[in-house]
Image (cartoon, rainbow, N blue to C red):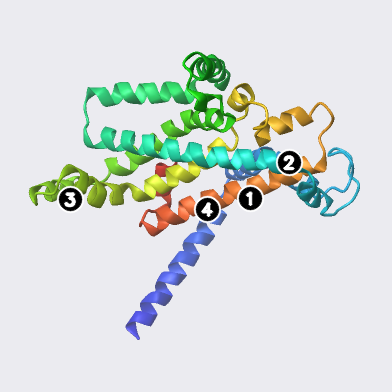
Amino acid sequence: MTQTTTETMLRAQSTARGRRTRARMTGSDIALRVWGILVMLFLFAPIIVIVIYSFNTGRLLVSWGGFGFDAFLTIVEKPQIQNAVRVSIITAFIAAIIATVLGTLAGIAMSRYPGKWVWWFLALLLLVSVTPEIVDAVALLPWFVFLGQDAGIAMFNDGIVRLSVGSSLFATAVVSYIVRARLVGQDANLEEASGDLYATPFTTFRRVTLPLAMPAVLAGFLLAFTLSLDNTIIAAFVQVSGTTPWPVYVLSALRSGLRPEIAAVSTIMLLLTLVALAVVALVLRRAGDSATQIARTMTGG
């Protein structure tokens, strides 16, 4: 009886606080809320328009011809679109693997072996992150040509290899941030205890360090995959004939006019990205992270 009365009182107090909060809303509070809604519309309106126009039955994307699924059916009928999507997914997957391996090792090293070198290394990673993609693209093209032709390394003449390596640059920095952010807040006592129990460094890494970092590793992999799907500028420079990724295909389609199937594939890729981000949040939530910790890990903060 006492517990029920206490719960009723708490509920009443919460309701009263909510009413007082609503009553105290000033004009500036309302203005800020309206401004926030306008900002959200400004950010997401173009995406909403693309999703709507992916169901356009007209011949051109900008000419609405009615609602239908013709654009999605066209994807099945056009091998060029299928090949571009296939190349993008394959290269994004390979780039995500490269970025995850390198970024995980870098993140663990920065979190477990602190020192002045960490800040220099972080500065280099930041430089990779903020360098314009056009600079990376111009630098990568002659380097790939040198490795593939002058140095005789045939693999660098392959379009998939070029695209994968080029897409993994920025993604590696992102994974490094995420893994470091995850492990910095973790106590190293378990790893020290593993060493005290005569475990080898590799065993400690495999059974203690890697499981601790695994949520961030999986999150980094999925984020690297989604980032690599949208690597347009580097892909346009380093691609070779027969391995045109989806972003470059869209750029080339601008010359003849965008068709609704472009929006249809873009919608599918948007859904793929949202699913990947949802899986990232789910993995981190299963690991016991709060919403604040999930945002901190995903941004490398």
Residue pictured at 27% horizontal, 34% vertical:
109
Q: As shown in the figure, which amino acid type bears the numbered disc 3?
A: Leu
Measured Cα–Cα span from mark 1 to mark 3: 39 Å
Residue positioned 73% across, 33% down in the render: 250
Three-letter code, disc 2: Ile
**Sequence order check, earlier mark of 1 and 3:** 3
> Which residue bears the numbered disc 1?
271
Where is residue 123, by image quadrant? top left
Q: How far apart are marks 4 and 3 (CA)?
A: 30 Å
**As rendered, which of 262 and 288 lies closer to the eye?**
262
Q: Specify which label sits upstream in the sequence, 4 or 1.
A: 1
Residue beneath label 4, please?
A: 278
Q: How crowded is mark 4: few (under 14 residues within 10 Å), some or many (20 or more)?
A: some
Which residue bears the numbered disc 3?
190
Query: Quick one: label 2 or label 3, which is nearer the N terminus?
Result: 2
Q: State which quadrant residue 236 falls in.
A: top right
Q: Taking the image as drawn, is residue 299 in sight?
A: no
- The kind of secondary structure element at disc 2 is helix
